[in-house]
Amino acid sequence: MPIDPEILREAMRYWSTGVAIVTASHGGIQHGMTVSSFTSVSLTPPQVLVSLARNTRTHELVMRSELFGVNVLHASQQEVSDRFAGRMPDDLDRLEGLETFTLESEVPFIRGGLAYFDCRVVTTLGSGTHTIFIGEVTTVQYQDSNDPLIYFNRGYRNLI
């Protein structure tokens, strides 16, 4: 018997994760969304994985541009996480009013984060309602800090 999606969602809330925002840009449109599905795949070649819902604007931009950025958030960026987690509608420019910059590609990154990964899509895999994107990391930037934004059971947490 299939698992009820709400039961799965409830159980997954007990998986602690760092918080990241995937950003993309194509044809003058930029967008982003908060994700918990981000992980390293390979060090050689340098690759990371993100999983994006197919019905999102960010997914569409990543598919078209074949580029994405990952912004690992600092503990002070809870409001930024909320903005990109859907508290601001998908059809608005969630990056408007935020200080951004670019690395190698045209993908916007949000200032104040812990780490930034500029990625070129090398593999896509459809699964259920999502697409798994594996990206080759073309540029990385980070700051040394012990204050990541952590998410657990519907709330932000501190390491200490």
Image (cartoon, rainbow, N blue to C red):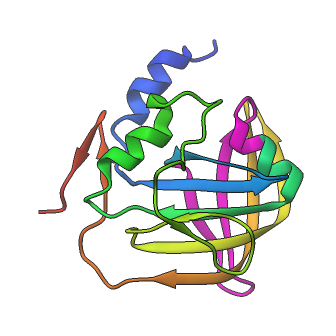
Left or right of 62? Residue 19 is: left
Residue 145 placed where, x, y %? Answer: 28, 79
Quarter of the image where the C terminus is located:
bottom left
Q: Which residues are magenta?
A: 36-59
The mark total stands at 0
Residue 141 placed where, x, y %? Answer: 52, 83
Q: Quadrant of residue 158?
A: bottom left
User: As drawn, which residue projects farthest toward the front?
Assistant: 97
Q: Is residue 56 above or below residue 131?
A: above
Q: Residue at x 63, y 55 (%)?
A: 23
User: As drawn, which residue projects farthest toward the right?
Assistant: 64
Q: Quadrant of residue 106?
A: bottom right
Q: Residue at x 62, y 63 (%)?
A: 108
Residue 118 placed where, x, y %? Answer: 66, 73
Q: Residue at x 79, y 53 (%)?
A: 28
Q: Magenta stretch containing residue 140, yes or no?
A: no
Quarter of the image where the N terminus is located:
top right
Q: Magenta stretch containing residue 54, yes or no?
A: yes
Residue 137 placed where, x, y %? Answer: 69, 77
